């Protein structure tokens, strides 16, 4: 497979490299766990720096398309079985549709320096601070979900907003940012001491853990959300259509 990058193009080199890698991993030569060329050789072939190439590789590793083996190399991730939920709604909309009144038990707003994975998802300078929103929410008789959300600075949140309002209503009406796509990962984990205290369960209790990656109409990342749910109070329903 011939690989090349247009160094005269206005498209940033790391974006071109990312698009090229996406094409590479769909090629039969690299499917089903096969290793890519090593970073040094690939960077030389594309005439870009290793840091530029690594930026593109990190994006695909973060998305789960590539797996990096320290001291061995980078390979295409094995295919996994996944289900996509239909009719994605915000948490408030989900609860309203079920006739459940939502109560906010805690709400914390801070500006933090993102970790490497979060900065890679937002494709931003890891040294720039982003808004972090933490909310403990549930029914009137007690909390059952703890949310942590990080937002790209581009959306314009200041931290002064009334976060008792639905989040995506705030983004759309106050900042003209429309959330149109949610990519999610759901797993079962054991509650650590911190999460157990928030959800009022025993440490080590099984809880539902959901990662949500939210994009706007231009397919630009706007929110990275972590949700921790009490297993005895919440059911995640998935509707799949066979194609």
Image (cartoon, rainbow, N blue to C red):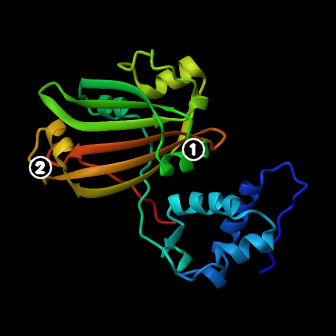
| Residue 102 can be seen in this image | no
The image shows residue 10, relative to residue 108, as above or below, that is below
Which residue lies under the disc numbered 2? Answer: 203
Nearest to the observer: residue 32 or residue 124: 124
Nearest to the observer: residue 205 or residue 127: 127
Q: Position of residue 222 (x, y in %)?
A: 55, 37
Q: Position of residue 107 (x, y in %)?
A: 30, 24
Horizontally, residue 218 falls left or right of residue 162, namely: right
Mark 1 neighbour class, 10 Å CA radius: few under 14, some 14 to 19, many 20 or more: many
Q: Which mark is residue 122?
A: 1
The secondary structure type at the circle numbered 1 is helix
Q: Position of residue 22 (x, y in %)?
A: 66, 66
N-term mark: 2 or 1: 1
Q: How many marks?
A: 2
| Residue 221 can be seen in this image | yes
Q: Residue at x 45, y 20 (%)?
A: 159
Q: Residue at x 57, y 31 (%)?
A: 153
């Amino acid at each position: 497979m011939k690989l090349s990058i247009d160094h005269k193009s206005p498209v940033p080199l790391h974006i071109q490299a990312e698009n090229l890698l996406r094409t590479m991993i769909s090629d039969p030569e690299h499917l089903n766990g096969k290793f890519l060329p090593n970073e040094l050789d690939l960077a030389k072939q594309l005439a870009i720096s290793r840091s530029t190439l690594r930026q593109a590789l990190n994006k695909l590793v973060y998305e789960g398309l590539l797996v990096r083996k320290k001291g061995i190399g980078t390979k295409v991730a094995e295919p996994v079985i996944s289900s996509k939920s239909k009719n994605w709604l915000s948490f408030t909309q989900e609860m309203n549709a079920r006739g459940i009144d939502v109560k906010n038990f805690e709400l914390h707003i801070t500006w933090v320096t993102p970790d490497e994975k979060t900065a890679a998802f937002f494709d931003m300078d890891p040294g720039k601070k982003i808004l972090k929103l933490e909310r403990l929410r549930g029914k009137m008789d007690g909390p059952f979900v703890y949310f942590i959300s990080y937002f790209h600075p581009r959306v314009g949140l200041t931290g002064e907003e009334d976060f008792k309002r639905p989040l995506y209503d705030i983004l759309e009406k106050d900042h003209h940012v429309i959330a149109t796509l949610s990519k999610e990962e759901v797993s079962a984990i054991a509650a650590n001491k911190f999460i157990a205290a928030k959800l009022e369960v025993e440490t080590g209790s099984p809880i539902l853990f959901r990662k949500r990656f939210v994009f706007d109409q231009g397919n630009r990342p706007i929110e990275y959300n972590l949700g921790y749910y009490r297993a005895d109070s919440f059911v995640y329903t998935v509707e799949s259509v066979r194609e």
